Image: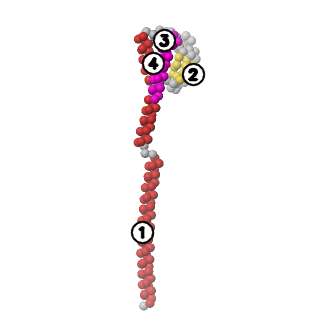
Amino acid sequence: MNVADAPRPGWYPDPAGGVRLRWWDGTDWSDDYRSRPSVGQLLLAEKAWEAAQTAGRVADPRLPPGASGLSRADTAEIISQVREAARLEAERAADLFSQRARTATKEIQPLITQYTSKILRWIRIGAVIVVVLLVAWILFQVIAQVSFFEWLGDRIDNISE
């Protein structure tokens, strides 16, 4: 590619892939990266561009990037508006995330409670089974002893007769 055919310096999608932008200095890629602008930033820049067009301050697109025809005050105002839009977007995203996190914690029952209640239920069932078996064993022992002593008494009576 000829230097005359190369795109003018600016931020372009990273040729190595990814979602970041990379600076093209007109001849080679630099090691400077930045994130892509948000939807809010793009809308704000578009409004500023339209306002500049209606005010007649937009420069010829064939001019270099620094010769836009905007004064320093106008540029500073645009930058402050972009910063404000980015701050508002970040706050909105944080509020949305917090709201979703609160909703999720209210809707989801903690797993430890779920498993603890299952374990306690099985312990109760086991305790009931143990108590029933213990009562049955005691009744069996009582009946067995009574019947044994009756049998023994009958044998002793038969011996003495």
* Secondary structure state at the residue bearing disc 3: loop
Q: Which residue is mark 4?
A: 45
Which image quadrant is residue 46 in?
A: top left
The answer to which of marks 2 and 3 sits earlier in the sequence is 2
Q: Is residue 4 above or below residue 124?
A: above
Do the numbered discs 1 and 3 sit on residues whose CB atoms are within 8 Å? no
The amino acid beneath tag 2 is Asp
Can residue 14 be seen at all in this image of the molecule? no
The amino acid beneath tag 1 is Ala
The answer to which of marks 2 and 1 sits earlier in the sequence is 2
Q: Is residue 102 above or below residue 127?
A: above
Q: In the rendered image, which quarter contains the N terminus?
A: top right
Q: Which span of residues is magenta-colored? A: 65-91
Q: CA distance from mark 1 to mark 3?
A: 98 Å
Do the numbered discs 2 and 1 sit on residues whose CB atoms are within 8 Å? no
Do the numbered discs 2 and 3 sit on residues whose CB atoms are within 8 Å? no
Q: Which mark is residue 70?
A: 3
The answer to which of marks 1 and 3 sits earlier in the sequence is 3
Nearest-to-viewer mark from 1 and 3: 3
Q: In the rendered image, which quarter contains the C terminus?
A: bottom left
The answer to which of marks 4 and 1 sits earlier in the sequence is 4
Q: Which mark is residue 136?
A: 1
Q: CA distance from mark 2 to mark 4?
A: 22 Å
